[in-house]
């Protein structure tokens, strides 16, 4: 039976790649918790706009699935993770900045969002993670 390209190209993982997977998994867990919270809010507390509440819960669920996929992709060493992770971290940074300076500032939430985003950006641009996530054409 021929070997798959995944099993032939994935070797031992660098600690930075493992750290990237862990931070992405923590972000996914946070998004999952936020999604569950939003769904419970729909069921328990009446919303001013039920359509908006449902839409927000659906978007949070889709974001959760996307970050889970990024975490799995980072574990497998897939190259598409680099761009996707940068986009998500920029969005998290924007939400964090909004948390610092909104109508009701919540710097605690801002830091909770900003620190992992900075860590992921650092890890994505580190040489070991770049090497692990380099595009593989199967000829290795």
Image (tube, rainbow, N blue to C red):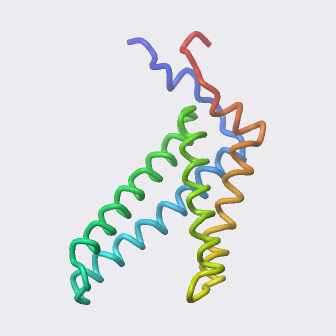
From the viewer's perspective, tell me whether residue 43 is left or right of residue 138.
Answer: left
Across and down, in percent, residue 58 comes to 30, 63
Across and down, in percent, residue 140 comes to 62, 13
In the image, residue 79 above or below residue 105:
above
Name which quarter of the figure residue 127 lies in.
Answer: top right
From the viewer's perspective, tell me whether residue 9 is left or right of residue 54.
Answer: right
Residue at 71% in and 41% down: 14
Across and down, in percent, residue 105 comes to 61, 86
Residue at 64% in and 71% down: 97
Q: Nearer the viewer, residue 61 or 99?
A: 99
Across and down, in percent, residue 4 comes to 45, 19
Residue at 47% in and 65% down: 29
Residue at 48% in and 44% down: 72
In the image, residue 64 above or below residue 40:
above
In the image, residue 59 above or below residue 108:
above
How many tags in the picture? 0
Q: Nearer the viewer, residue 44 or 49?
A: 49
Name which quarter of the figure residue 79 lies in.
Answer: top right
Q: Nearer the viewer, residue 81 or 90?
A: 90
- The extreme right residue here reads 127
- The extreme front residue here reads 103
In the image, residue 134 above or below residue 123:
above
Q: Quadrant of the N terminus?
A: top left
């Amino acid at each position: 039976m021929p070997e798959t390209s995944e099993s032939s190209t994935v070797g031992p993982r660098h600690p930075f790649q493992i750290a990237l997977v862990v931070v992405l998994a923590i972000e996914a867990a946070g998004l999952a918790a936020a999604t569950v919270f939003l769904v419970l809010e729909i069921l328990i507390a009446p919303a001013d706009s039920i359509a908006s509440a449902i839409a927000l819960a659906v978007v949070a669920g889709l974001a959760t699935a996307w970050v889970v996929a990024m975490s799995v992709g980072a574990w497998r060493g897939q190259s598409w993770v680099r761009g996707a992770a940068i986009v998500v971290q920029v969005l998290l940074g924007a939400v964090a900045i909004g948390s610092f300076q909104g109508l009701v500032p919540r710097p605690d939430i801002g830091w909770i969002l900003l620190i992992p985003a900075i860590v992921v950006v650092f890890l994505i641009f580190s040489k070991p993670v770049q090497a692990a996530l380099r595009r593989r054409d199967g000829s290795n």
